[in-house]
Image (cartoon, grey):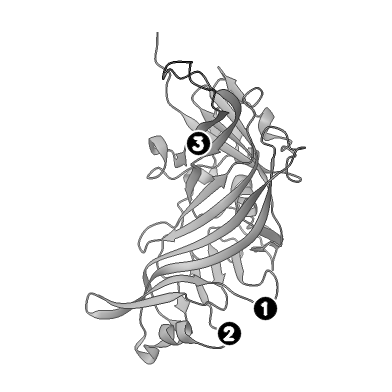
Amino acid sequence: MADQNWATALAVETQADFDTIGPNVPGLGSPLAVADGIVLGDRASGDGESGITIATVQRIARQIPQVADSFTEQADSFQRVDITGFSIAFPMQGNGATSTPAAGEAKPFAGIDAIFQGAGLVGANGTNPLYEYTPLAGTTYLTIGLWVADLFYVFKSCVVESLDIVLTPGENAIITANFLVGSHDPATQLTDGVTFPTLDYGTMATLAAPTVDGLAFSAFGQARGFESMTITIANAIAKFKDSNVALTGERQAQTGRVITANGTIYVAAADSKAAYDNVTGTTAPTADLTFQLGTIAGAAGVLNAFKVECNNLQAESIKHNEIGDVLAVEISNAKCTATAAGSEFKLTAN
């Protein structure tokens, strides 16, 4: 019997609400383009150099007693499946369009936009051609299609439990979206024997993502660089029993969201205790963490850049250390804060 060749891909779209499957992903075939929500992963991440970490399918069952007068196990009684460990990593890149400029021209590719929404961000047009994401006071659920060779999975009511933007100087910024899957129906949402689709990633495959350099990075009121930095959007999702939810008997509800920065920052001589003052402060912080990744597109420029604003940064802990012969400070769980809903963070495609 011949071996099955390896291949994998995924597509993402938003749902109207919880437990309402997306209208397009379940019926996708071939060929597929970026408008269908496919996302090209980072080759240095995931399984099989795909950027995708394939979901683990776990059987949830009720055990049956052992055979009488023995230790022989009987087959258990199937209840449902849990889907865990599912993620995708991809470069932080723009859509590569040429700015005229016009409204929303910088909006990211469809699948990436859906992932940002699933992470708890809501997008809107900014000053032409900008597209701006800010925190949503609610939850956006996703339907995800996953191809693994000749298998096609559909996952419903997913959220991005955490989204990490990893910034390493001299390299591309890499975004990792870790999915929390709401449900999967083995009877109808796994198709065997499909023809793996033809994938046209277009500009997503040909456009070089911006490199982490020349960011004009600023934190704690001082312009200084960093050795490493990760911005994390962490969504707290609770599950509750619900008799009317098919497949799982559970509904999901978001109970919180924290956006944090963790990394090692070089210390500016002009105010070497700025981070210390932040972590020991008794008043609400007002200094932000900001940077510009890539060059802002002017008229006729290529849209391939992002600005990140973590407002009113408040560190949980700091530790001073040495890099080479200069002072640096390691910041941990520095959270974005605000007194107005949705104003603690902004991600601008520009």
Q: Amino acid at mark 1?
A: Thr
- Callout 1: 10 Å neighbours few (<14), some, many (20+)? few
Q: Quadrant of residue 156?
A: top right
Q: Which mark is residue 339?
A: 1
Residue 64: image x %, image y %? 54, 23
How packed is label 3: few (under 14 Cα within 10 Å), some, or many (20 or more)? some
Provide the residue designation for mark 3.
Answer: 55
Spatial distance from mark 2 to mark 3, Cα to Cα?
A: 41 Å
**Secondary structure state at the residue bearing disc 2:** loop
The residue that mark 2 highlights is 284
Q: Is residue 80 left or right of residue 270?
A: right
User: The N terminus is located in which quarter?
Assistant: top left
Q: Amino acid at mark 2?
A: Ala
- Residue situated furthest left in the rendering: 325
Q: Position of residue 136 (x, y in %)?
A: 69, 61
Labels 1 & 2 near each other (Cβ < 8 A): yes
Give SS at disc 1: loop
On the image, the x and y values in percent for residue 206 come to: 48, 45
Residue 54 visible to the viewer: yes
Relative vertical location of residue 271 with respect to residue 47 in this rendering, above or below = below
Which residue is found at the position 47% from the left and 36% from the top? Answer: 54
Residue drawn where x is 42% and y is 82% of the image: 275
Q: What's the amino acid at mark 3?
A: Ala
Residue drawn at point x = 43 percent, y = 38 percent: 50
The relative height of residue 284 versus residue 289 in the rendered view (above or below) is: below
